[in-house]
């Protein structure tokens, strides 16, 4: 039986390791001893000297020339490189479509609304981001103050690397998507049946982050074939219908934004190098990094034609599609076991989280916020199976800060996370149903 003391040991060890890793990194970074590795985005050698804090939000909203004039941007003290050399004012793929158009409609609405809010407040360019972070912190306080009273070390889980990376990059959407998926998962675990409010949580999360669509299976739990088909149609039509409204609204708010442009940008992302960016926990990125880390070895011991063939396979779309098919098959197998009562609800949502992480390329650190919520959920459950300790330990390893490196160095972050995610996936699939 798992004792509370064992759970407490995990949080204590995690807290100690986090402090030590941050301390060692910043000492080595200041001493210039780890030039080939970085921890945060601002530690990237190509970014030193530029202000990039909260750039995923702020650099986007201050690229809107239909809202801000140059004079207004200067009044708000927006960094000059965001005014005169903003990456969101041109296309990253040498076409006529701007980078911002890669965002789904609800994100466009949020960006434009945030820009207008920043313009109205008018104090400083960063105020709107601070407001959003305060809202997230209020949610954390209201949702987790009870569990934090039981174990204060859980603060290190709550404010672990994925959340700190979210703060640094300003990727509010990962926070929004993670929070609404957490609300859905929590209700799925504690309730016998999901309701309309849970459907709304699902739609918002997936409208922000479509990769969460795999959690739609939660609505089919304990349904016969006829009921499952009806529920699937209901959920799918609701999602499509509401996103059609989002699309119409976003097209009005942002001049030139169209669904065709979104699809083109989505296709470009599926073949571009962004799939293999740093702070990435996808299996495709892991294979890509592993190959190029040992490319010199392959070129010496393997025929050039074979090496070129492997490289072509790795950078192509086929490998990622194959990875997606395999993990979706594993997810459906797990869902079959859930329906048969062979695994419990929490194990299934852990499996779904692993599947969306491993099969999505790229899957950056801030999206791992969902594992923060999963750790807190599992930790709070009164259960009596040793599998819980393994799940918590693996999630803790995923949440720990790790060094990143550009090719040809082996990326420690991707290596550790992909291994832990796969172990977590298979341990959860082949676990037996636990007694609460």
Image: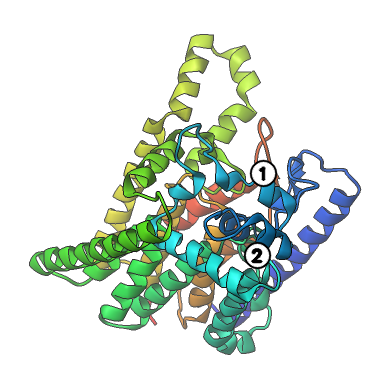
Q: Count every numbered label the image shows and give the total.
A: 2
Label 2 crowding class (10 Å Cα cut-off): few <14, some 14-19, many 20+?
A: many
Circle 1 Cα neighbour tier, 10 Å, few/some/many (<14 / 14–19 / ≥20): few
- Residue at 67% of width from left, 30% of height from top? 408
Residue 75 percent location from the top left of the image: 72, 64
Judge by depth and name the residue closer to the eye, 243 or 408: 243
Q: Is residue 429 visible?
A: no
Q: Is residue 100 left or right of residue 14?
A: left
Image point (66%, 72%), residue name: 122
Circle 2 sits on which residue? 167
Along the line of sight, which residue is nearer the eye, 147 or 195? Answer: 195
| Secondary element type, mark 2 | helix
Sequence order check, earlier mark of 2 and 1? 1
What is the basis of the colouring in this image? Answer: rainbow
- The residue closer to the viewer here, 170 or 88, is 88
Q: Is the C terminus in the top left, top right, bottom left or bottom right quadrant?
A: bottom left
Please name the residue shown 41% across and 69% down the image: 181
Please give the label number shown on residue 85. Answer: 1
Vertical comparison of 248 with 41: above or below? below
CA distance separating discs 2 and 1 = 23 Å
User: Taking 432 as reference, is 132 left or right?
Assistant: right
Q: Nearer the viewer, residue 202 or 249?
A: 249
Q: Is residue 130 visible?
A: yes
Q: Tell me the mark number nearer the camera, choosing from 2 and 1.
A: 1
Horizontal and vertical percent position of residue 189: 36, 77
Question: Is the residue 312 above or below the residue 205 in the image?
Answer: above
Q: For mark 1, give the secondary structure.
A: loop
- Give the quadrant of residue 105: bottom left
Residue 252 horizontal/vertical position (percent): 36, 60
| Location of residue 114 in the rendering, given as x and y in whole percent from the top left corner | 53, 67
Q: Are marks 2 and 1 in contact (CB under 8 Å)?
A: no
């Amino acid at each position: 039986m798992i004792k509370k003391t064992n759970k407490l040991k995990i949080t204590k060890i995690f807290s100690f390791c986090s402090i030590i890793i941050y301390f060692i990194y910043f000492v080595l970074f200041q001493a210039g001893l780890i030039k080939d590795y970085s921890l945060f985005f601002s530690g990237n050698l190509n970014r030193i000297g530029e202000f990039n804090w909260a750039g995923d939000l702020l650099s986007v909203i201050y690229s809107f020339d239909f809202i801000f004039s140059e004079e207004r941007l200067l009044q708000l003290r927006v960094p000059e490189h965001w005014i005169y050399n903003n990456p969101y004012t041109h296309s990253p793929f040498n076409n006529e479509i701007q980078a911002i158009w890669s965002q789904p409609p609800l994100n466009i609405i949020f960006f434009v609304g945030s820009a207008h809010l920043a313009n109205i407040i008018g104090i400083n360019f960063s105020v709107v981001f601070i407001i959003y972070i305060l809202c997230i912190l209020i949610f954390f306080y209201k949702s987790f103050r009870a569990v934090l009273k039981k174990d204060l070390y859980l603060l290190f889980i709550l404010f672990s690397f994925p959340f700190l990376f979210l703060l640094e990059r300003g990727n509010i959407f990962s926070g929004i998507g993670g929070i609404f998926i957490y609300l859905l998962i929590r209700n799925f675990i504690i309730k016998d049946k999901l309701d309309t409010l849970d459907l709304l949580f699902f739609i918002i999360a997936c409208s922000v982050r479509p990769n969460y669509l795999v959690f739609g299976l939660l609505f089919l739990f304990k349904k016969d074939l006829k009921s499952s088909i009806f529920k699937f149609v209901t959920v799918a039509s609701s999602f499509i219908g509401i996103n059609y409204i989002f699309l119409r609204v976003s097209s009005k708010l942002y001049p030139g934004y169209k669904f065709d442009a979104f699809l083109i940008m989505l296709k470009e992302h599926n073949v571009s190098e962004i799939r293999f960016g740093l702070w990435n926990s996808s299996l495709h990125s892991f294979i890509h990094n592993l190959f190029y880390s040992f490319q010199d070895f392959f070129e010496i011991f393997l025929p050039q034609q074979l090496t070129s063939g492997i490289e072509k396979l790795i950078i192509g779309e086929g490998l990622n599609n194959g990875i997606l098919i395999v993990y979706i098959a594993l997810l459906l197998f797990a869902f079959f076991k859930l329906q048969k009562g062979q695994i419990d609800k929490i194990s299934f949502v852990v499996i779904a989280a692993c599947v969306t992480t491993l099969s999505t390329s790229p899957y950056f650190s801030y999206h791992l916020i969902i594992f923060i919520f999963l750790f807190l959920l599992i930790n709070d459950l009164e259960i009596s199976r040793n599998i819980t300790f393994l799940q918590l330990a693996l999630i803790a390893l995923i949440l720990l800060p790790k060094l990143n490196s550009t090719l040809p160095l082996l990326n420690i972050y991707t290596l550790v996370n992909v291994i832990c995610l796969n172990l977590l996936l298979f341990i959860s699939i082949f676990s037996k149903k636990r007694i609460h």
